[in-house]
């Protein structure tokens, strides 16, 4: 979110920096992203410089923001390429999740009131007797 907010002003000065000039990265952040400069520089200046000079650095602004954010997300613990891979895997897992959710679970009950059939809202539909939680039900396995 931070990069998306400051990228329109920061993009051109940052991309104009030469390889190996960490001071230019620091200056660009201090001049064009002042409220957030302490979040990125000097700690990530060398990483930012390395990422923006990668051959696969995107051309479009929105893609640049995501590429840089994903690359810096795992620093200093993982390399930028590994960080992008991890972010991509997490996004893929999120997309693979079903958008649906269970609306109701049903049990077949035999109630002391004489009702036999499916339960409604974890209770007997005739007398509203609640299904008591059991250790077997909580663990999902039967005991011998």
Image (cartoon, rainbow, N blue to C red):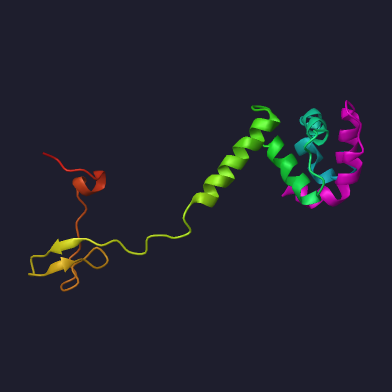
Q: What residue is rendered at 19% in x and 60% in y? A: 131
Question: Is 27 on the left-hand or right-hand side of 77?
Answer: right
Total marks in image: 0
Question: Is 54 on the left-hand or right-hand side of 28?
Answer: left
Locate the C terminus and report the quarter of the image it occupies.
Answer: top left
Q: What residue is rendered at 11% in x and 65% in y? A: 111
Residue range highlighted in magenta: 1-29
Residue 102 place in picture, x, y as percent? 37, 60
Q: Is residue 124 magenta?
A: no
Which quadrant holds residue 46? top right
Q: Is residue 3 magenta?
A: yes
Q: Main secondary structure of the magenta part?
A: helix
Residue 33 place in picture, x, y as percent? 84, 45
Residue 113 place in picture, x, y as percent? 8, 69
Question: Is 95 on the left-hand or right-hand side of 142?
Answer: right
68, above or below 23, in the image: below
């Amino acid at each position: 979110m931070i990069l998306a907010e400051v990228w329109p002003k920061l993009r051109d000065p940052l991309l104009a920096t030469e390889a190996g000039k960490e001071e230019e990265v620091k200056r660009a952040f201090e001049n064009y992203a002042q409220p957030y400069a302490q979040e990125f520089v000097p700690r990530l200046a060398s990483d930012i410089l390395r990422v923006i000079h990668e051959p696969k650095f995107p051309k479009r602004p929105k893609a640049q923001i995501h590429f840089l954010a994903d690359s810096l997300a795992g620093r200093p613990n993982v390399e930028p390429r590994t960080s992008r891979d991890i972010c991509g895997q997490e996004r893929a897992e999120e997309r693979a999740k079903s958008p649906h959710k269970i609306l109701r679970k049903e049990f077949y009950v035999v109630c002391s009131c004489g009702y036999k059939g499916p339960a409604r809202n974890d209770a007997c539909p005739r007398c509203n007797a609640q299904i008591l939680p059991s250790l077997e039900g909580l663990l999902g396995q039967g005991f011998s």
